[in-house]
Image (tube, rainbow, N blue to C red):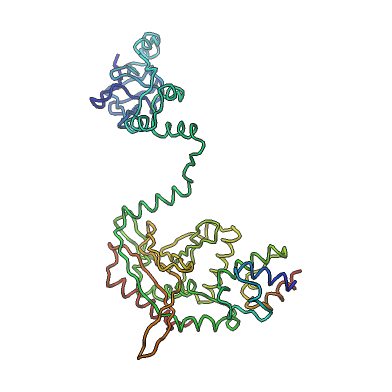
């Protein structure tokens, strides 16, 4: 699942997957702005056939928090 | 027996189309009553009755009649109406079988080489440009008609240009410190925000000092100051332009504004807005933050007084006290209605926003 999430992030942020890792955070990645954050949410929803709640969308601030939210839904 | 005839509307017209009867056959009409409506190539005309009595209609709507043709009689007594010989009346009618072409339509026909037979095939008595456009579209399948939504947008742009005497001011804001603040909230404050959220928050903060900027224009000659700052935000996530409204932003925290805008962005992406989301806007923020967009000068939406343009961040190198320094710059523009706001007020308004953005905001 982690690999698939990284692939989705790379596609959403239009960057090479080698720039992403389990340590990737909104703080450190300039491409991860407020709008691309929501595009990522939509892309992850489509990829994993899940739907995020608003408080979950807000709680995602890095790769790990994204993985945790997804794990709770599948 | 009093006649109602097709009047001579102007010397260039020899006929007119009967559009509607405002009375029914047999009705009692009085002098001055508007009894029918006509259309010529130049104008719509109402026909008044010069007589009092019972009307006998002997013509049909959507037909064209020569000037002077009798289209009805007004009979003084009900018995005369009941005994009226309709065949005698109808003999007076000379129905115009051919069609009339409006002036703009004549020009359109010449420009597009439309044949007489094509016009006749339309089967209508008054030929307008709109009717002819259908013919053109049929003959050229590659023609694409303007989208109706785009037409509405274009109409608003035109109204804005025609009616609003606008002026524009652009401010350069150093956001080095602001970016540090924005980054520090990630993962710490339970929410994240960007410049769109911050601008809406700052607008709420300046509302009390600058209420005129949040007014609504009434009848194009008056304005009414609103009781709250209801900020519309232009959102285009690739599914069309939406302008949802953050109502009462003057009483909201940065966190609640950020959450609201996040909800709106998700609604735009999921295409599930409700009409209430767009209600009561009195100030619009135009988001033009696409990379390398230096600035966009937006139009003021009719009915509102201002629109603020938020543009993408730019890098700037300056020499400060002999040292080379890189700054991140935000360009913030304000288009405003000069009937209500003067340049010095607009300047003060933007300076206040600038001061808040440059680090003096607190949630």
In the image: residue B88, left or right of residue B12: right
Looking at the picture, does residue B208 appear above or below residue B41?
below
User: Residue at 32% across / 61% down in the picture?
Assistant: B223
The percent position of residue B228, horizontal first and vertical second, equals 42, 68
Q: Position of residue B321 (x, y in %)?
A: 35, 91
Give x and y (percent) for residue B3. 30, 17
Quadrant of image for the C terminus of chain A: bottom right
Q: Which of these two is toward me, B51 or B61?
A: B61
Count of numbered tags = 0
Q: Position of residue B92 (x, y in %)?
A: 34, 11
Tell which residue pokes out farthest to the right in this image. Answer: A74
Image quadrant holding the N terminus of chain A, namely bottom right
User: Which image quadrant for residue A61?
Assistant: bottom right
Q: Nearer the viewer, residue B186 or A4?
A: A4
In the figure, residue B354 lies in which quadrant?
A: bottom left
In this view of the protein, which residue sits in the foreground, B31 or B192?
A: B192
Q: Nearer the viewer, residue A63 or B227?
A: A63
């Amino acid at each position: 699942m982690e690999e698939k999430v990284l692939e989705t992030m790379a596609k959403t942020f239009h960057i090479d997957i080698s720039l992403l890792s389990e340590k990737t955070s909104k703080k450190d990645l300039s491409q991860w702005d407020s709008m691309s954050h929501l595009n990522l949410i939509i892309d992850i929803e489509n990829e994993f056939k899940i739907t995020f709640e608003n408080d979950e969308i807000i709680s995602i601030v890095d790769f790990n928090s994204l993985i945790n939210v997804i794990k709770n839904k599948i | 027996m009093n006649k109602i005839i097709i009047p001579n509307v102007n010397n260039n017209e020899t006929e007119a189309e009967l559009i509607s009867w405002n009375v029914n056959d047999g009705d009692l009409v009085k002098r001055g009553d508007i009894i029918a409506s006509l259309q010529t190539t130049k104008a719509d005309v109402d026909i008044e009755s010069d007589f009092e009595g019972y009307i006998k209609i002997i013509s049909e709507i959507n037909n064209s009649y020569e000037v002077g043709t009798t289209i009805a009689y007004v009979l003084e007594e009900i018995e005369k109406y009941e005994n009226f010989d309709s065949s005698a009346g109808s003999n007076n009618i000379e129905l115009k079988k051919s069609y009339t072409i409006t002036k703009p339509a004549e020009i359109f026909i010449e420009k597009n080489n439309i044949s007489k037979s094509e016009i006749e095939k339309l089967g209508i008595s008054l030929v307008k440009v709109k009717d002819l456009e259908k013919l053109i579209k049929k003959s050229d399948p590659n023609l694409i008609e303007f989208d109706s939504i785009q037409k509405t947008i274009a109409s608003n742009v035109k109204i804005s240009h025609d009616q609003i005497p606008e002026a524009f001011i652009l401010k350069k804001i150093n956001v080095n410190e602001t970016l540090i603040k924005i980054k520090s909230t990630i993962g710490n404050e339970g929410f994240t925000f960007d410049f769109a959220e911050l601008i809406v928050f700052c607008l709420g903060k300046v509302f009390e000092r600058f209420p005129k900027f949040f007014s609504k224009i009434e009848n194009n000659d008056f304005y009414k100051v609103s009781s709250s700052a209801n900020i519309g935000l232009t959102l285009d996530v690739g599914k069309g332009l939406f302008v949802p409204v953050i109502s009462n932003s003057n009483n909201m925290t940065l966190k609640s504004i950020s959450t609201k805008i996040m909800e709106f962005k998700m609604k735009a992406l999921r295409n599930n807005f409700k009409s209430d989301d767009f209600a009561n806007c009195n100030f619009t923020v135009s988001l033009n933050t696409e990379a390398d967009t230096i600035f966009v000068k937006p139009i003021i939406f009719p009915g509102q007084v201002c629109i603020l343009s938020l543009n993408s961040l730019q890098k700037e190198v300056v020499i400060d006290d002999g040292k080379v320094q890189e700054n991140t710059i935000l360009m913030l523009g304000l288009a405003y209605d000069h009937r209500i706001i003067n340049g010095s007020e607009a300047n003060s308004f933007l300076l206040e926003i600038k001061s808040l953005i440059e680090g003096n905001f607190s949630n």
